[in-house]
Image (spheres, rainbow, N blue to C red):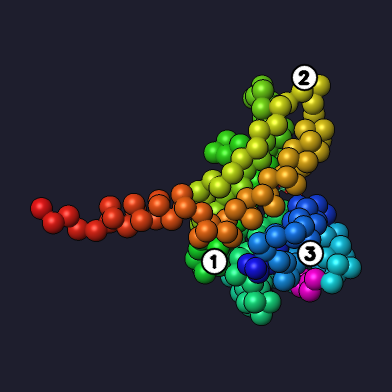
Amino acid sequence: KAKIAILISGSGSNMAALLYHSKLPNCPYEIVMVGSNKPDAGGLSIAAAEGISIFAHPHKGMTREAHDQIMHDAVIKSGADYIILAGYMRILSAQFVQKWDGRMLNIHPSLLPKYKGLHTHQRAIDAGDKFGGVSVHLVTAELDDGPILGQCKVAILPDDNAESLAKRILFAEHQLYPHIVCEYVSRFQNPKYLLDKVRALALALPQSH
Ligand code: GAR
C-alpha cells in the first residue's frame, strides 16, 4: 500500500473521510501520519484515537522555510511516500514544494482555475455562478495552480449563503478526495497513464530525420 501523510490546520473532516476510506477493502493507501501547524486542530485527536501517529508544530516565531523543514523531517520519519494537504492553511516554501514534486496533492473548494485563494464560496455566489465545487490538484510552487486531477461540481441554490454552500461542498469533498487519492497512488497500474507516459517519452526523443 502507498503510505500517505496528511497535513491539516482545522477540523480535519477531509482527513476523517480519507481515514475511513482507508478502512474499506482493497484501499490502495494507508495513513502513516497526520501533521498540523495547529496543536489544537480538531482532526489530530480523531487521528490519535484511531491509532495514527500525530505530529504538531506551531509556525509562530520562525521562518516559513524553517517550519516547512520541521514538517518535512516529520513526514520523512513517518515513512510516507505522499503528502495529502487537507485544509492545511499554510503557503508552502518553494524548497518544500520541490522536495514533494509529483507526490503532494491539495484539495481546494472551488472549480479551479476559478477562485484561487480564500473566500471561494462567497466569490462564487457574488459572481452569480450556477455552480461551485471542489478541485483536487498536484501542488506546484504557484498557489492553487498545479495540474488538476479531479473536480466535482455542486449546484448553488438561490438562497445559498457562503456557509450553507460550504457545508454542501464539503460533502462533495469527502467523496472526491479519497477517490482521487486512490486513483493517483495506483496510477502506475492504469493503462491510460502508462500510454500517456510512453507517448510523452516518444515525443521527447530526438527525431531521426
Ligand atoms: C476544506 O473545505 C478544504 O477544501 C479547504 O479547507 C477546508 C478544510 O476542512 N481548503 C482550502 O481552502 C485550501 N486552500 P476540513 O479541515 O474539515 O477538511
Q: Residue at x 57, y 59 (%)?
A: 186
Give the overall secondary structure of the magenta segment. Answer: strand
Which range is magenta? 52-56
Pointer 2 or 1: first along the chain: 1
Q: Secondary structure at mark 1?
A: loop
Q: Which quadrant of the figure has residue 59? A: bottom right
Q: Residue at x 50, y 60 (%)?
A: 188
Label 2: few (<14), some (14–19) or many (≥20) C-alpha neighbours in 10 Å: few
Is 55 in front, or is 79? 79
For residue 38, which numbered disc appears in the image?
3
Label 1: few (<14), some (14–19) or many (≥20) C-alpha neighbours in 10 Å: some
Q: Amino acid at mark 1?
A: Trp
Q: Residue at x 59, y 60 (%)?
A: 185
For residue 100, which numbered disc appears in the image?
1
Is 158 in front, or is 126? 158
Does label 3 point to a residue whose CB lies under 8 Å from ligand 1?
Answer: no
Pointer 2 or 3: first along the chain: 3
- Find residue 180 and report its horizontal and vertical position in percent: 63, 50
Work out whether residue 127 can be spotted.
yes
Q: Amino acid at mark 3?
A: Lys
Q: Among all residues in the image, which is located at the extreme left?
A: 209
